[in-house]
Amino acid sequence: MKALRSILAKIALALGSALATLVAVDLVLLLVQGPVRVVEDFYEPAPDYAYKMQPNLTFEFANPYHGYRGTVHTNALGLRGGPVVVPKPPGVARILFIGDSMTAGLEVNENDTFEAVCSRLLGGAPHIDVVNAGVRGYNLDNVLAFLQNVGIGLEPDLVVYTFVDNDLTANADFSPETSDWSRGLTLSGLAGRIAAYSHLTYRFQLLQQQITLRRQTDNKQNERVYVPRGLYALFTTTTYLTDASAVLTGQRIAYMDSLCRVHGARFVLAGAPHRLEISPPAQDWLRQQLLKSTAADAAAAPDFDGVRRYLDWVAERAGCARVDPIPAFRAGLPQARDYWFHKDDHLNVRGHRLFGEIMAEKLRPLLPAGSAPR
């Protein structure tokens, strides 16, 4: 019995020592590198435009299921990136990108965002200053209110709005979203919350979910069917003048253009490249879903250029510049294989790179003379 107790004591000591070592290593990593990421608390209220990211933060934004992990830094304004100097220094051309998660690009590191790619191709500092004002979960009213209350005061020369299908609104009242649904993208349960600060727990959870992903996520029986409502509406709408959402959305975009003109800035309307607009397999999938549907509009053939046609119509009515990335994405898809994360509509690093190249090409002629190499 005495020998058994001695063995158990040694085992307990070994396990305790191992656990203490792991905790010590985790605490050192926490102190040196900071939290793995902030769970559900990197936002704060913004009275004029509902909410924003907290200023002067550094955190990891990650989702093992979809395969992304980006390091995010916010400046004093709560925007992603470095400080924004106001008044704008002489000789600097400032480009302000506004929009939602497609603009924010939290899924990739800052240097990999399309804004960073665009800035480098246009020559970068000190002559080009690119500001990323994208915030996850923003609707069109959040974007408009931010531009009106903060963005235009940053003295941009160009304001580029990246339209996303869920920005389409049928709400006649001005109503910015007050929260971000994407806050739910966290590791589950108590382990998930510990993993927000524990580097070792996070890596264990990451490995566990990656194994589960390989086993289950490509099982067609478990595949979740999802067709973005705004995207499908634009795939099937042709009479914009009689469609409330098309008219109201167009009016809000036209107001942003007018606001920019009053303050001496140029407004540019860009479309975000969505998988369903570009990928033939994704388009075949949507056709199959419509064939299976029992809805009255099941027979409607989706027009995969519907978003492009609508944005062209809005830009023509407003008289603003327009960036259409869809042709270049379609042309590049056979070589790139995919521009989005696994079962997610956000751009991966390849997608951001191509989008940044398109932006640089289209925006260069719109910049003030002498600000960027021709």
Image (cartoon, rainbow, N blue to C red):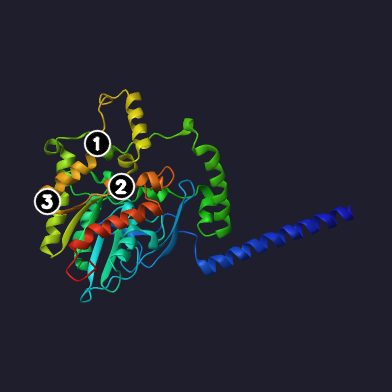
Other residues around mark 3 within 10 Å, as few (<14) / some (14–19) / many (≥20) = some
Mark 1 element type: helix
Residue designated by label 2: 273
- The one of 49 and 255 positioned closer to us in this rendering: 255
On the picture, is 101 further left or further right than 224? left
Residue name at image x 36 percent, y 51 percent? 351
- The one of 354 and 231 positioned closer to us in this rendering: 354
* Residue type pointed to by label 2: Pro
Position of residue 88 measured from the top left corner of the image (x, y, whole percent): 22, 73
On the picture, is 256 further left or further right than 329? left
* Residue type pointed to by label 3: Ala
Residue 308 circle label: none
Residue designated by label 3: 318
Mark 3 element type: helix
Location of residue 294 by image quarter: top left
Q: Along the polypeptide, which appears first: circle 1 or circle 2?
A: 1
- The one of 154 and 77 positioned closer to us in this rendering: 154
Location of residue 257 by image quarter: bottom left
Residue name at image x 34 percent, y 42 percent? 275
Other residues around mark 1 within 10 Å, as few (<14) / some (14–19) / many (≥20) = many
Residue designated by label 1: 235
Other residues around mark 2 within 10 Å, as few (<14) / some (14–19) / many (≥20) = many
Residue 192 appears in the figure: yes
Foreground tag (3 vs 2): 2
Q: Along the polypeptide, which appears first: circle 1 or circle 3?
A: 1
* Residue type pointed to by label 1: Phe
Distance between the Cα atoms at labels 3 and 2? 22 Å
Q: Along the polypeptide, which appears first: circle 3 or circle 2?
A: 2
Q: Is residue 86 above or below residue 167?
A: below
Position of residue 8 measured from the top left corner of the image (x, y, whole percent): 80, 54
